[in-house]
């Protein structure tokens, strides 16, 4: 089996009988290696004491009084956020359950960095055994914003941080340990270059073609299938739909903020202007293999998923919408 996304830390985790990921001390210690948490030379004694104590026992309870004793305000905030996140992970049997609790309760003050890292490693678990490089590359949309560009008639999506030069390689201690080069070169993932993806998966430096009718949207459909089935325990079939025509929106899910706006407009019967239509990147039809799991009022009808880019041509997919937006009977009381 080809490995990928080593920087997610999946190899540091154990597995529950359910197949979910179980937190280990080794995984928790990776957070302590983040530059925001390593005490600088001028750090106070309280901060150094906390750091050393957690290095020895990353599960050690940490009281609010201990954090309040840290002299630097930014350090106090960083440690408070980390401990709250760590404690949430430890309250649940698996990382999947911890993520589901965040989705249910709201992300609140949890740093987007932590949420994306959690999605990264859980998506790695959901895709375990996948040997299709394009599906794995498409799943990067779950936790890394993509910048869209039109090139020679093709709609290409590339990692926003990489092409922007803000963060040429993902800034995690694992990446530093792996020695991943910072001077990433963007290439488009094709059938011919697919074999290159596995060795480069932690560089996030291969673009994907999301043009309607091309295999990139089919790959994203499969990645969403795996994500939904991993979390919800249901079997779904998702296919890319070439155009927003003759589509009855009995139920729809926007995969991002802009897509939700577009879906709302279509549902209300509003005419979409050219500007809105140009932002629509993908439309997918989802069907349940067992219609009995659906809400009765839409049972047997397709569910449509929409993906769009923002005005600045960025795709910010929200994988939590897949978990909360489907018309499942057991979710009927959750609103």
Image (cartoon, helix red, strand yellow):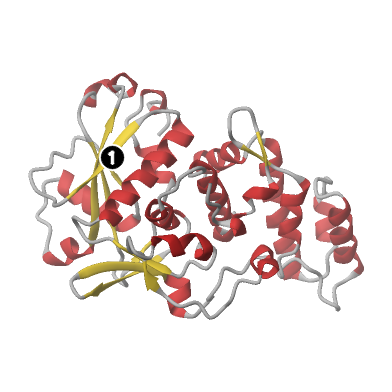
Residue 101 in the image: state x and y as whole percent. Answer: 56, 38
Q: Which residue is mark 1?
A: 238
Asked where in the image residue 327 lies, by quadrant, the reply is top left
Asked where in the image residue 171 lies, by quadrant, the reply is bottom right
Which residue is depicted at the point 15% across and 51% down? 242
Q: Is residue 324 above or below residue 272?
A: above
For disc 1, the neighbor class at 10 Å (few under 14, some 14 to 19, many from 20) is: many
Which residue is depicted at the point 83% across and 69% down? 71
Say whether residue 226 is left or right of residue 239. right
Which residue is depicted at the point 65% across and 32% down? 16
Q: Is residue 144 visible?
A: no
Residue 192 in the image: state x and y as whole percent. Answer: 34, 64
Residue 99 in the image: state x and y as whole percent. Answer: 56, 43
The residue nearer to you, when weighing 116 against 79, is 116
The residue nearer to you, when weighing 86 against 62, is 86
Asked where in the image residue 23 lies, by quadrant, the reply is top right
Say whether residue 146 is left or right of residue 63. left
Q: Split into 4 quadrants, where in the image is the C terminus?
A: top left
């Amino acid at each position: 089996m080809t490995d990928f996304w080593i920087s997610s830390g999946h190899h540091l985790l154990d597995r529950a009988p359910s197949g979910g990921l179980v937190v280990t001390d080794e995984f928790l210690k990776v957070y302590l290696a983040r530059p925001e948490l390593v005490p600088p030379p001028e750090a106070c004694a309280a901060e150094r004491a906390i750091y050393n104590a957690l290095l020895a026992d990353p599960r050690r309870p940490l009281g609010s009084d201990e954090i309040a004793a840290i002299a630097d305000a930014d350090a106090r905030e960083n440690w408070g956020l980390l401990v709250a996140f760590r404690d949430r992970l430890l309250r649940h049997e698996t990382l999947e359950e911890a993520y589901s609790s965040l989705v249910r309760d709201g992300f609140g003050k949890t740093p987007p960095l932590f949420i994306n890292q959690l999605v990264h490693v859980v998506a790695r678990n959901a895709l375990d055994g996948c040997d299709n490089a394009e599906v794995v590359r498409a799943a990067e949309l779950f936790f890394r914003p993509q910048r869209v560009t039109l090139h020679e008639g093709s709609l290409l999506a590339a990692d926003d941080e990489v092409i922007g030069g803000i963060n040429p390689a993902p800034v995690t201690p694992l990446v530093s340990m792996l020695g991943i080069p910072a001077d990433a070169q963007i290439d488009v993932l094709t059938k011919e270059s697919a074999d290159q993806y596995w060795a480069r998966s932690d560089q996030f430096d291969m673009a994907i073609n999301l043009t309607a009718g091309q295999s990139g949207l089919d790959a994203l459909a499969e990645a969403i299938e795996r994500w939904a089935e991993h979390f919800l325990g249901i079997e779904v079939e998702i296919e890319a739909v070439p155009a927003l025509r003759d589509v009855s929106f009995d139920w729809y899910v926007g995969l991002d903020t802009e897509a939700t706006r577009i879906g709302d407009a279509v549902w209300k019967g509003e005419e979409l202007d050219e500007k809105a239509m140009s932002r629509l990147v993908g439309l997918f039809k989802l069907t349940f293999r067992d219609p009995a799991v659906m809400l009765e009022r839409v049972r047997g009808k397709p569910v449509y998923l929409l993906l769009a880019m923002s005005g600045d041509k960025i795709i910010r997919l929200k994988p939590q919408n897949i978990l909360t937006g489907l018309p499942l009977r057991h979710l009927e009381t959750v609103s």
